[in-house]
Image (cartoon, grey):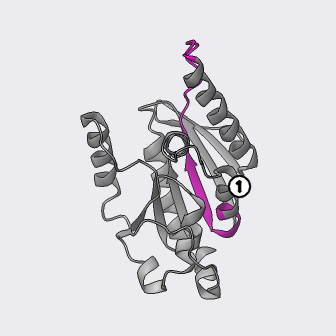
Amino acid sequence: MGKLIFITGGAGSGKSEYAEQRAEQLAAELGGPLYYIATMDPGPRDPDTVARIAKHQRRRADKGYTTIECPTNIASVRAQLLQTPASVSTHRGTLPRPSATAPCTDSMDSQRLSHAVFLLEDLTNLYANEVYGTAGHPHAIVAPILQLAAEAGVVILVANELYRDGIRYAEETDRFLRELSARARKLAAAAEEAVEVVYGIPVRLK
């Protein structure tokens, strides 16, 4: 199938709920495994973040997701899945954090990958982790996501609307937002579908 769906929206817009609904529907249609790629860094978290994560986990419970913790190096997700036995990669739970050096030679795993649905949440966390958590050696984001989308059944990418408030930020923050927006534009342009969720209502952009 090889499809990328780009979903964006402001905080509290309902984009996560919509993305999960789409992922679950598509996984049922394709009959393949359903993965949630979690990009939140597992380091110290404020109470609001902890509560938000717990809410998302409760909503996904018993819906068939296998969680992949991947705060950086998104390319390693594909590598891990292609060297994970079928009995493990289709288990509904949490896979170990991906290894960037895993071999990618199992053709049966490649076939299974072509029926898999991935929900990647979210682009902002992933990019922030690469910028601030890799000691100045960030990994690529756009190309690995596009490669995964080309080989998987469907990749649903959740992004955030962060650049519309008209506020003049400090130069470092403004540069981060510009660079994040540039990556979001490339991914949205490559996606077969782009949707903005506004007050819980999905608005199809393409």
Residue 39 counted in the magenta span: no
Q: Position of residue 82 (x, y in %)?
A: 57, 78
Task: Name the image quarter holding the N terminus.
Answer: bottom right
Image quarter (top left, top right, bottom left or bottom right) of the C terminus? top right
- Residue 176, percent across and down? 59, 30
Query: Which of 166/136 is in front?
Result: 136
Give the structural element (helix, strand or loop) at label 1. Answer: helix
- Depth check: give the residue in front, 141 or 21: 141
Residue name at image x 27 percent, y 48 percent: 54
Q: Does residue 169 belong to the magenta stretch? A: yes
- Identify the residue at image location x=57%, y=50%: 157
Taking the image as shown, residue 135 lies to the left or right of residue 195, namely left
**Residue type marked 1:** Ala
* In the image: residue 169, left or right of residue 96: right
Residue 107: image quadrant is: bottom right
Q: Tell me where the magenta segment starts and ends, as one range.
A: 148-170
Residue picked out by circle 1: 143
Image point (71%, 55%), residue name = 143
Residue 185 visible: yes
The residue closer to the viewer here, 171 or 38, is 171
Our reading of the magenta stretch's main secondary structure is: loop
Rendering coords of residue 148 (x, y %): 64, 63
Number of numbered tags placed on the structure image: 1
Residue drawn at x 65%, y 28% is 178
| Coordinates of residue 159 in the picture (x, y in percent) | 55, 40
Residue closest to the far front = 135
- Inspect this view and state whether residue 31 appears: no
Residue 73 sits in quarter? bottom right
